[in-house]
Image (cartoon, rainbow, N blue to C red):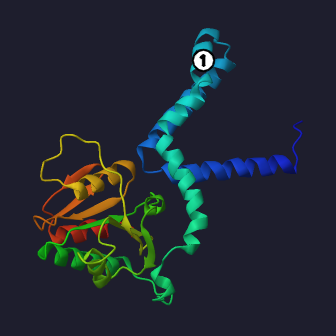
């Protein structure tokens, strides 16, 4: 008989909660694949240990023995983001939000409404050669990339997007993050890609957009200030010269 008490139940729920939060943090990123690889290596070690396969068990055991250091090295960015996410839960209460001054009254927008607002804003900014960087979250949470930006938590509107990226606006530098059908934050710095084979015409907006899609499953819309063309970054790749209709079809497939 197992000695099972209330503390064991609490212990199981706490471990499950931590694992779920870890999953939310790394889902849609390369780190999730690495985590699965480590998990299967550990599972294999348990099997060979149970079968008393001493040689291979000893070898894998030595590898796992230094696994904590390896995990810190491999997941250093994810650990940093996890700590930032915890800190942001307490800091966000005191940060700027448009809801304080322009309450939305709890009005919800449909996906088609949000898509049309984004497409109209992007088309207008492309025609006026206004640079823009708009990241739209899928399953990956974009909260951690709001560090250094301004929280808005406002409805997605054509006019607000154009106002944010207007050259005279204090929010025009950086990216707009759209998450759960809302403009979550603006003026957000994004991680730049390390790819070396990108075309010379790609500036910092393109590199930042690609960088975010390498680390998350977000879709990023980039409007070139120099050429006035629309590009879409997804999974580390860029599709250039996207038409408004093509952009509309892409966005309609997302669960915004």
User: Which quadrant holds residue 165?
Assistant: bottom left
Is 43 or 74 nearer to us in this picture? 74
Instruction: Check the image and name the residue furthest to the top.
Output: 55
Whether 31 is drawn above or below 256: the answer is above
What residue is pinned by disc 1? 62
Q: Residues within 10 Å of mark 1 (few under 14, many from 20)?
A: few
Q: Residue at x 54, y 50 (%)?
A: 23
Image position, residue 8 (x, y; %): 82, 46
Is 184 or 10 nearer to us in this picture? 184
> Helix or strand or loop: what does disc 1 sit on?
helix
Whether 43 is drawn above or below 59: the answer is below
Q: Is residue 6 left or right of residue 217?
A: right
Q: Is residue 242 left or right of residue 157?
A: left
Q: Is residue 38 left or right of residue 124?
A: right
Is 246 or 183 nearer to us in this picture? 183
Q: Residue at x 43, y 63 (%)?
A: 148
Image position, residue 201 (x, y; %): 12, 53
Q: Residue at x 50, y 90 (%)?
A: 105
Image position, residue 249 (x, y; %): 24, 69
Instruction: Check the image and name the residue furthest to the left.
Output: 227
Q: Is residue 27 left or right of residue 119?
A: right
Whether 41 is drawn above or below 49: the answer is below
Picture mark count = 1
Quarter occupied by the N terminus: top right
Quarter occupied by the C terminus: bottom left
Image position, residue 183 (x, y; %): 40, 74
Is 64 or 205 nearer to us in this picture? 205
Whether 221 is drawn above or below 77: the answer is below
User: Which quadrant holds residue 255?
Assistant: bottom left
């Amino acid at each position: 008989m197992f000695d099972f008490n209330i503390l064991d139940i609490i212990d199981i729920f706490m471990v499950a909660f931590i694992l779920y939060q870890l999953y939310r943090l790394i889902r849609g990123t390369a780190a999730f694949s690495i985590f699965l690889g480590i998990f299967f290596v550990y599972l294999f070690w348990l099997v060979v240990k149970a079968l008393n396969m001493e040689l291979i068990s000893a070898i894998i055991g030595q590898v796992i023995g230094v696994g904590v250091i390896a995990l810190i090295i491999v997941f250093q960015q994810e650990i940093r983001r996890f700590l930032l996410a915890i800190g942001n839960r307490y800091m966000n209460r005191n940060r700027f939000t448009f809801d304080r001054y322009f309450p939305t009254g709890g009005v919800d927008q449909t996906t088609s409404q949000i898509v049309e607002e984004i497409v109209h804003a992007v088309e207008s900014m492309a025609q006026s050669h206004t640079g823009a960087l708009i990241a739209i979250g899928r399953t990956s949470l974009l909260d951690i990339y709001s560090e250094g930006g301004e929280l808005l938590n406002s409805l997605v509107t054509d006019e607000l997007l154009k106002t944010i990226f207007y050259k005279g606006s204090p929010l025009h530098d950086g990216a707009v993050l759209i998450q759960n059908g809302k403009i979550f934050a603006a003026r957000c710095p994004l991680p730049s890609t390390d790819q070396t084979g990108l075309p010379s015409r790609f500036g910092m907006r393109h590199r930042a957009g690609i960088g975010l899609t390498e680390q998350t499953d977000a879709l990023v819309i980039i409007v070139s200030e120099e050429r006035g063309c629309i590009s879409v970054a997804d999974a580390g790749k860029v599709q250039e010269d996207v038409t408004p209709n093509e952009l509309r079809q892409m966005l309609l497939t997302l669960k915004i």
